[in-house]
Amino acid sequence: MKLKALLSHLRLALRGPAAGMELDERISQLTGLADPSRLYSALWESTTDAVIVIDQDNRIRHANRALREVLGYEPEEVVDQDIGMLQPPSVRQRHRAAMQRYLQTGQRTRDWRAFESTGLHREGHEVPLEISFSQVPTDRGALLAGFLRDVSARKQAEQALKLSEERLKLSMEAAGLGVWEWDIERDQLQGCPVARAALGIAVSRPVRFAALLARLHPADREQVEATVRRALQRPDGFRFEARVAGAAPGERWVMARGRAIGAAEGGATRMVGVLLDITERKAAERSRLEVEARLHEKQRLEAIGTLAGGIAHDFNNVLASILGNAAIALDELPAGHSLQESLEQIQRAGLRARDLVRQILAFSRRGPLNLVAQPLAPVVQETLTLLRATLPAAVRLQQRLPAEPVHALADATQVEQVLMNLCTNAWHALNGRAGTIVVGLDVAPPTVQREAPCAHLWVQDDGCGMDAALRDRIFEPFFTTKASGQGTGLGLAVVHGIVSAHNGFVRVDSEPGRGSTFHVYLPLALPSHDQPSGAARPLPPQRLPVPGRGEQVLYVDDDEVMVLMVERLLQRCGFRVCCVNSGDKAAALVRDQPDRFDAVVCDFNMPGLSGVDVARSIRGLRPGLPVVLSSGSLTAEVQQAAREAGVDVFLKKEDTFEALAPLLGALFQARAAGSSARVR
């Protein structure tokens, strides 16, 4: 069949006879061609799709030059050949049967206008094709005109896109990201399994936007809805964080990002985005804020403690002078003197002030700790024994101790002080009514705040309780809710200072009207058979009837009031005294008169040479000369440095009046007896 006739038949088959004639006339008018078949021929040969014509015997009657680009064949190679040469065996029989039925009956088993299949290249490999067929009636029977388009590039792009989407899906799932899409017009919101799991949505079918809002915490729904509605009018997207309603266990958070498609044109039809479960991040943020709050609180209390400790240290000099001079004056007055009662009142007030200073120093952690592997149950029992003798009968004391011993790295005396203060605070919380105070002990397991197990002491009361504002201030020194004159406000501040010095911490659970529980956490320790089983109590100082026998004492202090008091005190006790007000003068005296003095008593904190510096100088000038270091702040670091400098004895400055003379007497007696043991 000639090409011209074939094209004419194709035109008539596709457009109809009348339409074909009208098309010929129209083409002739537009192109000036008398025979439009020339145009059809040009189109036939210029198209990039391979065009083949097949008869009822499945033989190829014609093919254009594009077949070479699609399947590698020249048209001459395939004309009069069976169509099967262009088909892989896997589709050959199925396609042959379908084409025969179509040619014979005109009925289609599939849409032959456009479908995808596979062709067989001249070199033997398969080529993905997009194929369309139409029936062409002719005088010799129906023909099939087929158009074959190579879609290899499209298939590769689709495969690459599919792989990219799979990788993106895997990456997002690995990152915990869930993808979602909202068909706004139909109000259908669809999410991937990750997104549905984060929201607790079990069904895989689309849900309405209102159903999504119902999955969120009631307090967050209004804000989320407003955010999304605003995003429908804005092209820059949105972001929100919200809690999931009914999340178990605990509270679950999600974060969503999205963008409305078409918002810039004013008619958003879809919204797409991602959703992430941020529960762990929220928990980490809460923990970080809690740690920061505790750190700020610790720094604030440390600053207060440093200030309080500095004030207390300076106040020690004043107290020591008041107590010493009051005692000397009382001793010099004849019995029944009218001033005796006034001096005794001064002395009692001074002793109360000294106790207050000691509490301040305990809060500021200036005193050294004797940390040992201490069993805590005996400390609890001894504390409760002391408390039962002082608390009213209406207050019930209970203990809850474990069967196994719990050891902490602790100073027993200081821990007892902590329990005494907490129990006293619990008693005051009862406001004079009957109630119960429970003291317990156990081992607390590790948590986010505690990386290792801790010894856990707790004191619980059923008193008035506290609100959040009060809980935030209870560890501040001098803060109290009691009436004027009924409390110093140092009890809980001392607790905080002692526990912090033990590398522990305190936590409080309390609500108004529901009582309070103070939790004390201390580092655990392995038991040691060399340590005492109960709270160690210091022995009272041993006073000598006649402390001094004329020994020469060099006293060094930059405080004039202390110098005058100590000079009178030691002279009354039988010592000879030489007083100077600086470390430089003391060192010069020992250098110039090395054999003059039997002992040196030196204040630690002085301008110029400190007490440790003086001890170090004396050791170089006269080895073996006893040195007593006096200070209101005898920290472990100070004591270690002083021992290395040759200090023999340490004296708390506030105890100067009671302790200095007996201490010197014991020191000289030991030396006279030939003992090399140092007095501690």
Image (cartoon, rainbow, N blue to C red):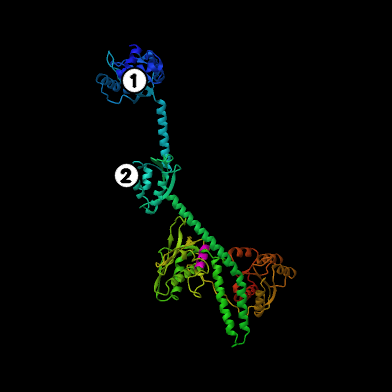
Range of residues picked out in magenta? 492-500
Amino acid type of disc 1?
A: Gly
Residue 363 lies in the magenta-colored region: no
Judging by the rendered image, the residue that carries numbered circle 2 is 203
Q: Quadrant of the N terminus?
A: top left
The kind of secondary structure element at disc 1 is strand
Please name whichever residue, 635 or 679, is drawn nearer the observer in this view of the structure.
Answer: 635
Q: Is residue 219 left or right of residue 144?
A: right
**510 in relation to 98, above or below:** below
Residue 265 coordinates in the image, percent (x, y): 42, 39
x 32%, y 17%: residue: 21
Cβ atoms at labels 1 and 2 below 8 Å apart: no
**496 in relation to 102, above or below:** below
Q: Main secondary structure of the magenta part?
A: helix
Q: Quadrant of the C terminus?
A: bottom right
Assess disc 2: are there few (<14), some (14-19) or many (≥20) residues with their C-alpha within 10 Å of its C-alpha.
Answer: few
Residue 73 seen: no
x 63%, y 84%: residue: 332
Displayed quadrant of residue 462: bottom left
Seen as rendered, the residue at the extreme bottom is 336
Amino acid type of disc 2?
A: Val
- CA gap, disc 1 and disc 2: 46 Å
Seen as rendered, the residue at the extreme left is 105
- Number of the front mark, 1 or 2: 1
Judging by the rendered image, the residue that carries numbered circle 1 is 146
Residue 541 coordinates in the image, percent (x, y): 57, 75
Please name whichever residue, 74 or 142, is drawn nearer the observer in this view of the structure.
Answer: 142
Displayed quadrant of residue 98: top left
Q: Is residue 557 left or right of residue 400?
A: right
Seen as rendered, the residue at the extreme front is 29
Assess disc 1: are there few (<14), some (14-19) or many (≥20) residues with their C-alpha within 10 Å of its C-alpha.
Answer: many
Residue 216 coordinates in the image, percent (x, y): 37, 50
